[in-house]
Amino acid sequence: MRCVVWAVVLGLVAPARAPAQEPSPGERLPVTKHVLPNGMTFLLLRREGAPTASFVTHFRAGGVDEWTGISGTAHLFEHMLFKGTTTVGTTNIAAEQALFPVIDAVADSFTAEFRKGGGTDSTRLAALRDRLKQLEDSARRFDVSNELDRILTENGAQNLNASTANDLTNYFFQLPANRVRLWFILESDRIRHPVLREFYSEREVVMEERRLRVETQPGGLLREEFLQAAFRAHPYGRPVVGVASEIQAVTRRSAEEYFHRFYGPNNAVVAIVGDIDVDTLAAWADHYFGDIPAGEPHRPVVTQEPPQRGERRIDVEFDANPQVLIGYHVPNAQHADAPALEILAAVLTGGRTSRLYQRLVIRNRIATSIFSFQTPGQLYPRLFTFSAVPIAPHTTQEIEAAVYEELATLAATPPTAAELERVRNQVQAGAIERLQDNFGVAFQLSRSEALWYDWRQTFRDDAAELRVTGADVQRVARSYFSRSNRTVATLVRPAAADTTGRSR
Amino acid sequence: MRVPLIAGLMLCTLPLTAAAQQPGDTRAQISALRFPPLRFSPPTPKRVTLSNGVPVYLLEDHSLPLFDVEVVSKVGVANLPDSLWGVGWQADNLMRTGGTLTLSPDSVDQLIEFYALNVFISTGNEQSNASFSGLSRYRDQMLDLGFDLLQHPRNDSSRVRITADQQLEAWRRRNDQPGSVLGRAWNQVMLGDHPLGRTQVTPVEVAGFTPARFRWTQQRIFCPQNLLIGISGDFDERSLLAKLERLLRGWPACAAGLRPVPPLTITRGPRLILIEKDVNQTNIRMGHAGSLKVANSPEYFAAQVADFLLGGGGGFNSRLLARVRSDSGFAYGVFSNWGADTKREGVFFAGAQIRAEKTVAGLALMQRVIGSMASEPVSARDVQLARDNEVNGFVFQFQNAGQIVQRQLNYAIQGLPANWFDVYLKGIQAVTPDQVTAVSRSYLHPDRLVTLVVGKSATFDKSLATLGSVTVMPVDSIHR
C-alpha cells in the first residue's frame, strides 16, 4: 500500500491536474458585480448554507496615502469610524459639535508645545494634556458611548472589526441573514456622517496599540526598522500605525481631511456573501448609497523607490535573543514575475520539505524556523523577505550564508520537476480550500476588486502560479536576489546587556 | 430548535418602503425594522460506533471537494506521571515529525506536502487532538497516513534531537516578550507548579527526551478507549466506515499508567507582585479563584452574562473596555475571563496592557470596575444585550459541517449533553439583572485579587505600594 503511495510522490503516477489554462475555481463563483453611478461597487454572492451574511468593505485608502507629518492617521481614522455618526452615538449633536473647536484649540496648543522638541516645557505639556482630557470628558455628556457596537452586538453581529494596511483599509462583520438591512442603514450613515468624537483619547489608545505591537515586541520593532531601512523614498517605509511623535500630534482636522480625500463611494468596494437575495440587496445598495456624491478618484502614489545601490545592513538593539530579516526589492503583486516569485518562495521555504527548511532546521539545526513573504503591501514594488530565528550558539550570519547559497543554487539550476509538482499541488488545493468560508471569500473578493478593479484577479493568480515553469523560477532568482538589492536587519542585544541568553 | 428551514425567503419579505426615510434618522430606521424569526434547522451529525468501541460523528457536505477528520483524545499531558510532563508536551510534535514504523520522517513530510494535506497533532493538558484535512480525492492517503502517525509513531532520534534543540531555544527566549513573562509568572503564582499551569518545557525535561519515553506517552494518550472521531466533508459513509474499521483494527487497547489530573489549589489573595521589565507599557493581570463550574445552573449562566458585561465578549460595551480604553485612553487591550470548565473551578482574571505612566491609576480603575459588577447593578438593557447577542447570533455556531461536528466532539469530551447548546441558550435567556449582581457579589472579590504587574516601576505614575504591600518577583524565579 505505502509503496504505491510512494510511487506517486516520486512522480511516477501524476495525480489529476487541471490543464494549465483552466480557470481557478474561484473565478467561476457566480458573483454579481453591481456598480452604482457614483462608482461604489458591490460584489454580491449567494451561497447555500447557514442563514448568515458576511460583509467586508475595502476602501482604497491606506497608510501610503498619508502626507508628511500625519503618519498613523489612516489607522486612527479607522478607529474613529466606530465612534458613531451625527445620530448614532449622541444625544445632542449640535451641542456636542459646538465643543469641538474648543477642544481642538487646546489640542493645537498641545501640538505647538510638543513641536518645540528639545525646548518643550514638559509641565505645560502635561497641563495641556490634562486640559484636553477634561474638555473631552465634558463633551461625553452628549455621547452615547459605543452605540454602534451596541446595536450590532444586540443583533447578533460577529467579528465586528476593521484593519488598516498600507494599500487599503477594511471594515467588516457578519450578521444573521434576516438582519442584513441593518448593515445598509448603519454603513450608509457611517460613511456619510462620521463624527470624530473622543478623538484625543482614542489617540492615546492608538499609542498603546503601537507600544503593544511594536515598541515592546522585538519582532515588531525589527520589522518596522527593516522597512524604514529598505524604503527611503516610497511610503512603504513608514509604519502604518504611525511614527510615535506624529501619532501624538495628529489632529481631528487632519483625520477629517483624510476622510474627505479618500473615503468617497467610488473608492469603496463591498462584498456581501452568504444566504442573501442578490436582487434585493442590489436595490438596497442603490437606495442607501446611490445619492452619495462621488469623491476624488484614488490616485496611486507617484513616488517610486529608486534602485538600491548597495547592500544595507542595520542592527536593531533590544533586550532579546537574535533574529534576522533579509529583504530584496521586487515588483508589485501584479507584475509578470510575481507568480514565479511565489513559486520560488514555496520551493525555498514552503513547508518542511522546502530547501531552506530542510537545510537550516532539519539537517543543520541552525534555526528554529525560516519563512519568506512579500511585504508590506501588494500595490507597489515591495520586499521579498526571509525571516529566521537562529538556535544558539548558531548565528544569524550562518543563516544568511545558507539563504544566499540556496538563492545562488536556484539561479544556477531550476527547481526539479518533483519540487514543481509538489508546489502546484499545493496551489491547486489552496485554490479550493480558500473558498470554504464565506467571510474569507468576502475578504478575497473585496480586496481583489479594491486593489486591481477586478474581483477575479486574486483567483487568476492561482492559475498563473500553476503555469510557472522551472525556467521562470530560475529567471527571477537571477533577476532580483543580488547583494546590492538587499537589506538585512538583525536584532541584537544592546552592548551593555547580558549576552548569555538569560534575562536581566 | 429543529424547525423548518425558510431562512432564504425572508429577505424579500422586508418592504423597501421602510427605507424611504430621510438620512439622519438612523435610530428611527432601525427601530422601525421588524425582523422575521430566523428559522434554521442545522444538520445533526450521525453517531456510529466502530467495532472497537470508538464513536464516530459523521456529517457529509459535498459543496466542495474537501474532507476533514478530527480525532480527539479525552486525556492529555496532565494525566501523565509528573516526570513525563515535558515529554508529553512535545509528544505531538514528534508524532507529526518523527516518522512512523514504516515511513521515515522525510517520507511523511513528503507525502503530506505532495498531497497538500493539513496534518496537525496536539497534546494538550487535559485533552489531545489530531486533525487531517485536504482535497477529498486524497481521502485514502489522508486516512492511511493520519492513523499511521497516531498508531505507529517512530520518534526517530534525529527528530528527537531537533525538537530538543528547539525547546532549549524556546527556553532561552522565554523572557523576550512581556506577554510571555506575564503568562508564565501568572500560572506559577496562581497554580504553583500544577501541570495545568505549565506551558514551557525546562532544560531538565529536555534532557529526558528519548524515543522510548515519547512512545510511552503517545501510546497512552492516543489509544482506542480514549478516542472520539469526527468526520465532515465530501465522503461516502459506507466506504468510509469500512475503511475506518480496517485502519483501526488491531490498535491495541490503552495501557495503564495514566493518572487523574491532580487536585488544583488556587492561590488566595490579596497579593500584589511586581516583575521588573524595561518596557514602556505595563502588562497587568489580576484575578482569583473563579468558584464556578460549567453546569446547567442559574449561577453559571449569570456568571457568563456578568463576564460578557465586564469584559469577556461584550465588545466596546463591556465595562472594562468602555472605562479603561474608551473613556480613559489608558490601554488598547483590556479584558476579563471568567473561565469555567466542567471538571473543576477555574480562575477568574482580568488583564490589560497599560501605558506605563498610568499603571497605578489603571490598576486602581480595573479593581473598581471589577467591584462595580457587585456595587453598580447592571441594567436590564445590558442583560438584554448579552442575551440578544447569544440568541440572535446562534446561527454562527452552525456555519459549516466541520464546526457542527467539532461542537459535538467537544460536548462529548467535556461530558456535556449533545443538546448543550440549546440548554445554554435557554439558560442565558433566563438570566436577570438581579442574578448578575448576586453572582458578582458572591464570587467577584476586588479586595482579594492576586495582581501581577510586569513593567518598569521607575516610570509608573505612583509607587505600586500605594495599592498594598508589594512582592518583587525576579524574572529568573519563574521556573518554567
Image (tube, rainbow, N blue to C red):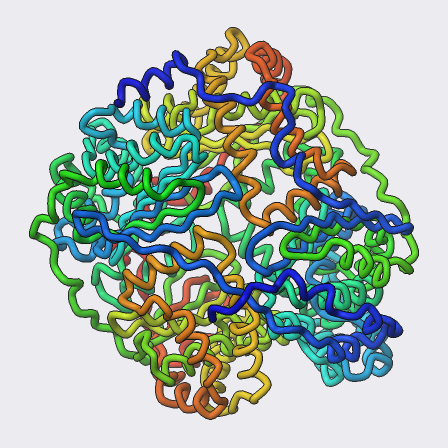
Q: Is residue A486 left or right of residue B86?
A: right
Residue sitting nearer the eye, A133 or B305: B305
Residue sitting nearer the eye, B259 or A437: A437
Q: Quadrant of residue B261?
A: bottom left
- Residue A241 visible? The answer is no
Residue sitting nearer the eye, A195 or A428: A428
> Who's the residue at 76% across and 64% down the image?
A184
Q: Quadrant of the N terminus of chain A?
A: top left
Q: Is residue A265 above or below residue A89?
A: above
Residue sitting nearer the eye, A109 or A293: A293
Q: Is residue A395 left or right of residue B228?
A: right
Q: Is residue A14 left or right of residue B257?
A: right
Residue A82 coordinates in the image, percent (x, y):
69, 66
Q: Is residue A360 above or below residue B305?
A: above
Residue A454 coordinates in the image, percent (x, y):
76, 37
Q: Quadrant of residue A351?
A: top left
- Residue B449 visible? The answer is yes
Residue B478 coordinates in the image, percent (x, y):
28, 58
Residue B467 coordinates in the image, percent (x, y):
42, 80
> Who's the residue at 78% across and 30% down the image?
A304
In the image, farthest residue toward the left: B256
> Who's the residue at 85% across and 74% down the image?
B24
- Looking at the rendered structure, the number of numbered marks drawn on it comes to 0
> Who's the residue at 63% across and 23% down the image?
A22
